[in-house]
Amino acid sequence: MKKITLLALLLVQNLVLLAQKPQLVPPMGHSYIVSEVAISPDGKYVLTAGGYPDNTVLLWTEGGQLLKILDGHQNNVSDAEFSADGKYIFTLESKTRTLNLWDNQGKKLRKLPDLDILAVCFSTDSQHVLGGDFDGNIKRFDLNGKLVQTIKASDREINKVICSKDGRYLAAGDYGGIIRIFNQAGELLNTLDGHGQYAINALAFSPDGQKILSGGYNYKVRLWDWRNNKVIKEIDQHRTVISTVAFSPDGAYLATAGSSENDVFLWDKQGNLLQKFQEDRINDLDFTPDGKALLMAPWSKSAKSYDLNGQHINSYSNDASPVTSVGFSPFAPDSIFIVTGGNGTHIRLWDAVSGEVQGFLNQKDFNTPVAFNPQYPSVMLAESGDSLYHYDLYSDEHIAIEKSAQVSHSSLVYNFAGDHFLISNFSGGIQLWREGDQEWEEIWENQLDSNQVTSLNFSPDGQYFLTATNRHWVPEVLKIIPEKRDQPYNQQGFPAVLRRVDDFTTVQQYGSSADKAVFSPDGKYVATNETYGLSVYNRQTARELFHISDAGNGVFEIATCLAFSPNSQSVVVGFTSNVIRQYNLQGKLIRQYEGHLSAIRAVSFSPSGQFLISGSNDNTAKIWNTQTAAEMATLMAVGKEDWLVTTPEGLFDASEGAMEHLYYVAGIEVIALDQLKDRYYEPGLLAKVMGFAEGPIRKVSDLDNQELALYPDLVEAKLLDDQISVQLTKRSGGIGPVSLILDDDIEIATDVNPERKANFTINLQQYAKHFIPGEINKLSLVFFNADKWLPSPPHHINYVPGSKGKDTPNLISLNDRSDQAISNTLYALVVGTSDYKGTQLDLKFPDLDAAAYKDMLQISAAGLFGNRMQIKLLSTAKGNTRPSKTAIRAALMEFAAKAEPKDVLIVYFSGHGATWPENDPSSQFYFLSIDNENFDLANPVNRQLALAQDSLQAWIRSVKARKRILILDACNSGEVVKQLDLGAKGSTLNTDQRRALERMKDRGGFFVLAGSAADMKSYEDPRFGHGLLTYSLLNNMPKVAAGDKNNYIDVGKLFQEVRDDVPKLAAALNKIQEPKLIGMEDFSIGIIKNDTKYKLPTAKKIIISSDFSNKKRLDPLKFKAEFNSQLEAMLANPELPFAYYPTDKAQGLHYFINGEYEVIATTAKVTAYLYKSDQENELETFNVEGSSTNVKALVEQVLVKVKEALAKLK
């Protein structure tokens, strides 16, 4: 099966959209300057080409949405152009002089590597390409690469070739400054000589074909009447080489720009200056087909369009940078962290266990080397300026290490012991640093005779290090032409050098020209990219074992990065040709890794050798299986803090910020992420790829074989009075259900077209109970394909019940507090389940959580809703209505009979939840009821007892309140119930659960606050007698109110505070818990004023597990277990200001009791000590004695004394 990347998008050739393969489009862009731009003849699409070493061509919509990467270029793209009929695209690679021909679907039709042309253009009939070669010829090729005509145009290289719009003429400009014009038959019509001996760098025909605009290396622009060999206007206002010239489509305007100046000039058709506006060093420009704007390629990673007054319209870019640093964490356990970086804002630390991703820097440093400490869980970042930064990965503490010089850094490496590191800069400087008692210390600094140290590497024993420095120039990928001069072999560099760490003396040299060098892990070998290839040497003798310089494809590839395998038996090499190759120590190719879209910049093995990670100029890092060379995942930094993970099969995981930039493309149709999200979204994807998460990766249809069954096309949806008349056109996926949505989220009808008609009418009166009379109600129609899995974008209709006529454009905010304060009602169902059937599922605090939340909600909501509140508490606490499935349904049905659209609904659950079937896109979320006794949801009886997601959604849908909140304080996965940490309610929001809750939010209008992020636990905290999530809610409600000038509790602000607060609370327990927000809308749910009386949980003092033994450090009486059991029972009293935490370690202030005992005959003498964590000496000493056969009584005696001592500590 052919593998594809997620970025291989398709465009169709016409407006008839057949079945297409959907492709996820990440926010990629050029990593270096844009060198060329082009616009399709209809103005709908834009091409941008990146200069070396970006080497990519991107296809965009006119509005700036990325559609496709035209991949496979090995070199700088010197030209990219649409054909006149819009059906074809060509791209020309300089130096290799390879012409690539594409159709307008983005499919490469053919690669023509042997044309040997410098300049190229499409013929006006779009059936040929015309190219100028080194020998002064203009060659006409058909689209299969067959030469059909040769015109001798000059004795010099042809630098520019153009065709007139009517196809009658062609012109060629050479390196000697001469322009010659020919007819189609190749007959010379005229010769223009006006740029001296300076090469012609820019040419354009006027739309009528009667004039030519030329720009040269002599800094001048000439407007010619070419028939009469007359200069109409010479423009000499440029101060640099002319890079580009253009006529507007109507011939009324001219545009010119220079390669090294910051001005774009706009002229009238006679060459009189009209406008000059600033943009950095223009490489290329063109008018849009309507003549109203200019598209240009400035000296940046973004193409831009401006109107003719110089006002910016669009940018064609995404924030992107090369990935130049990659690595797996080498400390035990290995590979749980991954680092990727390059540009400072795009450095990411990936936690492969939790799925969390962290960014570090805000500055856009061009290159920020980063390295793991081999022995300690930390990472070093070489930010430009006067500081390095050392980050502790577990404490999140970072220490700035001050340097003496304000420089940017090229390389950073630790020794194996992790107590020294080397760092180099772009000026040839190298520093050695050592870890001191209190801080890192600089040991020495030395200077090399080179402007850039490009590679540093410690020997395994730490006694030596390798240096490699840059060559005098950075070449492009060059085609070897024996008869031509200036071959890449002639560019002499410097050898890799082995030096002593202690005194910097040279020990050995390897080769003669390399800018990368690495040791093998066993220290026996050195590998370098000698003369742009790969050489492996004996470390001691510097004898070259083998050299590889040419893959045999006629293209000289440059080796850019190297890494030995952990067993020292092979070496991987990254090339500018976008591939990675792995060789054994005999120089035999073992395997090849393909999938990157641009030059490889970094490679690194995992410590076990199971994985390889690579970084590229295409803005991504990729993880590979080293046994099969299969791509496993792609990692991408988005913006300053967001991220994306994808797999070749089409699954993805992403931060919420990144999801805002993602979408799919099928043909020319952009499909919103939400339309396919259910099918391919896989939370916790990286952990599954790396094998740290339980269960297999969810199977999805292979995108390479999955034709997109498109939903019907909407022709018209017309509102008249209280009816919507709908007309559809059937497409590849047929006609499926049509959902009626209120306020973007609330599905009030799952199918208003049950008969699957192409033309039908919706009577809105039957849904009147959901609408607010006299106000605008925002409706949406969503059309599904026949298989019900692909929805259309929503079609919006503004509806005022009872009004006559069409929909109204002016919306009234449903978040306006004025209507809340007048007539809204709060409905809240608060459910806590501590006591399940049997004992396996029982929890401690959910009943207390629910009662406390209900009380705080009632107090705070009274200020906003007055007596318009209905809050129902269901819990397993004595005296309350138990939360059976029947009771939950009855409560929601009661709300449904009373609630109105303007009301607010809150549903709170504290207890267990699970998903079934697991690892399945159709899995359901189940809230376990009091009648469940285990997590075996494969048993249909258990599923019937639990509350299924679809049932809950149906019950909630019947409640007409438009504002809906779900608070979920802990769920559980049946897979891990027997392995729960002490104090953990359960593993909340595993992959299936997160996906199910996302669907609940999308289809039910819910905003969800869940206890923790994917595959992590939600904890009960004995300090507060609550789950951390509930405690944080209770504690932050007054704080949010105090921060609002009107004392409102806005739910959005509250949930964000909780999300930030809970991880800090969990850290005090040596735990990790990070709540997750799914969807969000900011509206008020209460008021707490200064005089509002409320009660917050008070933090109790913690007593951790105790330790008892005899003098031999043994515990034959099992005194420790009995003591801790009774201590826990004693401290369970909610009136006591102490709480028991079953661990022998804790952060922050806490107490503990240790002791010893001695048994003489049948008498046991016990001595116990009460300690406080911040004091060395004991606070109290307790002595008791009793029968050694009655340990329970002995413990009771000690605890009597402990209780008395604790009373003094209140």
Image (cartoon, grey):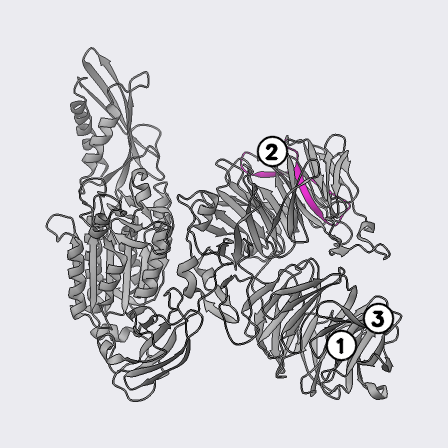
Per the image, label 2 sits on a secondary structure element best described as loop
Look at mark 2 in the image and give the residue it sits on.
Answer: 567
Give the quadrant of residue 506. top right
- Residue 137: which disc? 3
Q: Residues within 10 Å of mark 1 (few under 14, many from 20)?
A: many
Left or right position of 150 against 612: right
Look at mark 1 in the image and give the residue it sits on.
Answer: 162
Q: Residues within 10 Å of mark 2 (few under 14, many from 20)?
A: few
Residue at (42, 69) in percent of width and height: 733
- Residue 186: which disc? none
Q: Which mark is first along the chain, 3 or 2?
A: 3
Residue 388 on image: x %, y %: 58, 47
Between the C-alphas of marks 2 and 1, the distance is: 57 Å
Viewer-closest of 825 and 743: 743
Furthest-left residue in view? 879
**Which span is picked out in magenta?**
437-460
Establish if 1018 lies above or below 133. Answer: above
Left or right position of 544 against 285: right
The amino acid on which the numbered mark 2 sits, given as a three-letter code, is Asn
Between the C-alphas of marks 1 and 3, the distance is: 14 Å
Left or right position of 587 against 1060: right
Per the image, label 3 sits on a secondary structure element best described as strand
Give the quadrant of residue 765. bottom left
Do the residues bearing badges 1 and 3 touch, measured as CB atoms within 8 Å? no
Residue 1043 on image: x %, y %: 33, 62
The amino acid on which the numbered mark 3 sits, given as a three-letter code, is Asn
Give the quadrant of residue 237. bottom right
The amino acid on which the numbered mark 1 sits, given as a three-letter code, is Ile
Establish if 1036 lies above or below 835. Answer: below
- Asked if residue 443 is among those painted magenta in the image, a careful observer would answer yes
